[in-house]
Amino acid sequence: MRPAFRFVARLRRAVSAGIYFPAAVILLICRVRLVTLTHPDRIGHLCIEPDCFVKEGALGLRPKFFGIFLVPRDQVANQVVLDLWKGHLTIVTSPTLCAVLSPLLRFSFIRYRVDHYAVAIEETATCGAILAKWGQRPPLLKKELVESPVGWENLHELGLPPGAWFVCIHSRDGHYSFHDEHLHSFRNSSIKNYQLAMQAIVERGGWCVRVGEPTPEPLPRMRGVIDYANSDQKSSFMDVFLCANCRFFLGNSSGLYLVSMIFGVPCALVNLIPISGALPVGRHDLGIPKILRSEENGELLPYRDILRTPVANFRFSWQYEGQGILVEENSEEDIRDLVLEALERLAGKCIYDCKDEELQGKFVGLMRPGHYSFGADSRLGQVFLRKYSHLI
């Protein structure tokens, strides 16, 4: 940039600051803070950040102030989710008004950051501890908010019988976000490894509804399985409707499961990565992490060792590649076993013995401040812990 252009740019910033500074001071005196979401174009952040903001305030875990969210409607992943939060938050959605107010964000004293809830690169995400402290309180959003005969009619058209229960199934793949796939490919997993789990759900009288973005790899025809993600019924409303009304959500390290979480629907999460994020954020959730191997000798890397090193918090593919670490998906059997545990828990039949609690305690004890899910009040899968106890 030439000196003249730099001078003009600085002059404009100075003039803008002079105009907005008095307004910022007034907002400070009135105890008003402006809030922006870290990634409103990602549905997970659109769910977890407002949810934690409201709960954090209700629990007295942050200073008291009146928050105004600046969320331009043309930048959000799902307009239905944004509208649901209007019952709990003051949200400016007009792109024009957001543009007018956004210069105020340069004044840090009136801006409240929310990246600590879930982004938290190489830090603990506070969402797990906030949800743990929320405890048995009801969810902020009730599924009745998205109840609609149209939703059930769409499901019936796709094959779901009247009165049937279903599980949402989601597996993040390389078609989700092409522009940053090179950074996050280690989070991907194959939907093919979910087939035993889907069979287990169907054998117990349920249906499976695959959710997520359309993919060039449709599911094979299976009894009791609906490939909603690749259907002509897919819409923003149906995405939320399904997540709110499923028996539980079977997902992975991708934010779509958080739509179910904000409605109080339990989640069973597989292929969790980074390893420090092996404990799901929801206190009613189950999870199992991916397996890490040494590229040099193929040996499994013990979780007890991983969680003592920076590898525990690796958030980008190049980090694993640079350390010669292979990231391995959970097996079909491991995913099926977690689903069976989730079904048993929902039926009130799941029993954890002393050995189970000991293994759970050992793994949780490996978590330290700075680990992504430190403070979360969820569980690792029972069979997974027994099978890989030698790694803990």
Image (spheres, rainbow, N blue to C red):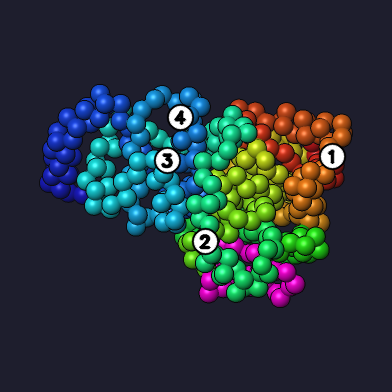
Q: Quadrant of the C terminus?
A: top right
* Stretch in magenta: 209-233
Residue 86 horizontal/vertical position (percent): 39, 46
Q: Nearer the viewer, mark 4 or mark 2?
A: 2
Residue at the image point whose x is 21% and y is 28% from the top: 26
**Label 2 near label 1: C-beta < 8 Å?**
no
Q: Name the residue under label 2.
A: 148
Q: Which amino acid does label 3 sit on?
A: His
In the rendered structure, which disc, 4 or 3, sits on the residue that comes first in sequence? 4
Residue 59 horizontal/vertical position (percent): 51, 27
- Look at the picture and state if 102 lies above or below 209: above
Task: Report how far apart the C-alphas of labels 4 and 3 lie in the structure.
Answer: 11 Å
What is the number of the mark on residue 275? none
Residue 139 horizontal/vertical position (percent): 56, 41
Task: Report how far apart the C-alphas of labels 1 and 4 lie in the structure.
Answer: 35 Å
Residue 227 found in image quarter: bottom right
Q: Which of marks 4 and 3 is in front?
A: 3
In the rendered structure, which disc, 2 or 3, sits on the residue that comes first in sequence? 3
Task: Report how far apart the C-alphas of labels 1 and 2 lie in the structure.
Answer: 36 Å
Q: Which amino acid does label 4 sit on?
A: Gly
Secondary structure, mark 2, is loop
Task: Report how far apart the C-alphas of labels 1 and 3 lie in the structure.
Answer: 38 Å
What is the number of the mark on residue 351? 1
Residue 202 found in image quarter: bottom right
Q: Is residue 231 magenta?
A: yes
Q: What residue type is labelled 1?
A: Ile
Q: Name the residue under label 3.
A: 88
